[in-house]
Each structure stands twice: as structure tokens, then as C-alpha cells.
Image: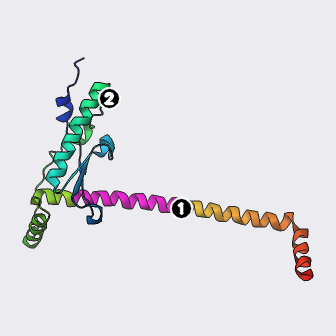
Amino acid sequence: MKTKTLQYYLDLNYPIEIRKIPEEEGGGYSASIPFLGKYAFVGDGETIDEALTSLENIKSYLFEKYLQEGIPIPEPPEEEEKGYSGKFVLRVPKELHRFLAIEAKKNGTTLNQYCLYLLTRKAFLKGIQDDIKDVKEEITRVFSCIKNIDYKIEHARSFAYPKMKIWDKDYDKAA
């Protein structure tokens, strides 16, 4: 079996997420490869291009280190790549085209990269919304369990300590 080289792994097509960093956190853009570790394989920069270049440098460094230390590097699943070129044509109204081009220019990026950012952001937000929905359902379930336990405790107290309640009433009279 032939040993895979650093260049082999660098040439693999890993899906990349790009997000805008809020101004209060320093601004710019962040690019990551969630498949390899969203917080390990991450680069940032003032523009999307700078973030992608930073990510490529991190990826090269980490892949080289992994190969030296014998750490296995996962390859992207092939099933996801079948039938998808990574390109598609989209017809939009002229007004939307103009708006997107102006926004891309304001953000110091190309129209294509800006649209990629918007699509990635929307997909990311959808994932967050789904996660929030799951957490909300779990909180509701846990809250229901806590209410049930609280009821059982109160119910048990009323049967287990009836004399205690009488004593409390007598104590209140004496005080």
C-alpha cells in the first residue's frame, strides 16, 4: 500500500464554512473545516480570501504534523461529491444582483464569495435553529420531570408527616 503524502491530503476537497466575525469580536471573516474539527482547522482574516489563505496554512501545518506523528487524517466522504461540481447557475432579478454586488464590494470580496458566505451562513443558522429546537424540547421534558418529582415530594410529605403539620399549627398558636 502506497503511503499518502502531504500533497495528497492538501488536494482533497474538504467542505469549508465561512462566517463573518462580529465587529465587537474584532471583525473580519472566519473559515473552518468542520469535518476535521471546527475549532482546530480554522483561519481568519480581514477578507474572505485572507481567511481562506489562513485556513490553508493551518491545514498544511496540521496535516504535516499529523503525518509526522502518525495521526490518521480523515478523508472527506466520497458519496457527497458524486454528481456535484460545486458550481451552479442561478438567475436573480437585476435589483437583487445589483444589491449583492454592492454588498460584496462593501465587504471587500467578490460577488461569488459574498453569495457563498450568505448561503453558508443561512445553512449554519438553520443548523443552529434545529439545535435550539432540540434543546428547547429537552428543557421542556426535563421541566416536566422536575414538576412531577416536586408533586411526588409534596404528595409524600402530606402523607408521611401529618402530625408535623398539626405541630406546625400548634407552634404558630404558641408563638
- Residues 173 and 90: in front is 173
Tell me: residue 76, above or below residue 50: above
Q: Secondary structure at mark 2?
A: loop
Secondary structure mostly seen in the magenta stretch: helix
Q: Is residue 82 visible?
A: no
Position of residue 4 measured from the top left corner of the image (x, y, whole percent): 22, 24
Q: Secondary structure at mark 1?
A: helix
- At which x and y percent is residue 164? 88, 69
Residue 117, given in percent of the width and then of the height, sits at: 20, 58
According to the picture, the residue beneath numbered tag 1 turns out to be 139
Q: Does residue 160 appear to the left or right of 1 in the view shown? A: right
Q: Quadrant of residue 149?
A: bottom right
Q: Residue at x 81, y 65 (%)?
A: 157
Q: Where is the C terminus found, in terms of image quarters?
A: bottom right
Q: Position of residue 19 (x, y in %)?
A: 25, 57
In reply to whether residue 133 is colored magenta, the answer given is: yes
Is residue 153 depicted above or below 15 in this figure?
below
Which disc, if any, is residue 106? none
Horizontally, is 152 left or right of 146 in the view?
A: right
The magenta stretch is: 119-140
Q: Quadrant of the N terminus?
A: top left
Q: Evaluate if marks 2 and 1 touch, with contact meaning CB atoms under 8 Å apart.
A: no
- Mark 2 burial class by Cα count in 10 Å: few <14, some 14-19, many 20+: few
Numbered badge on residue 72: 2
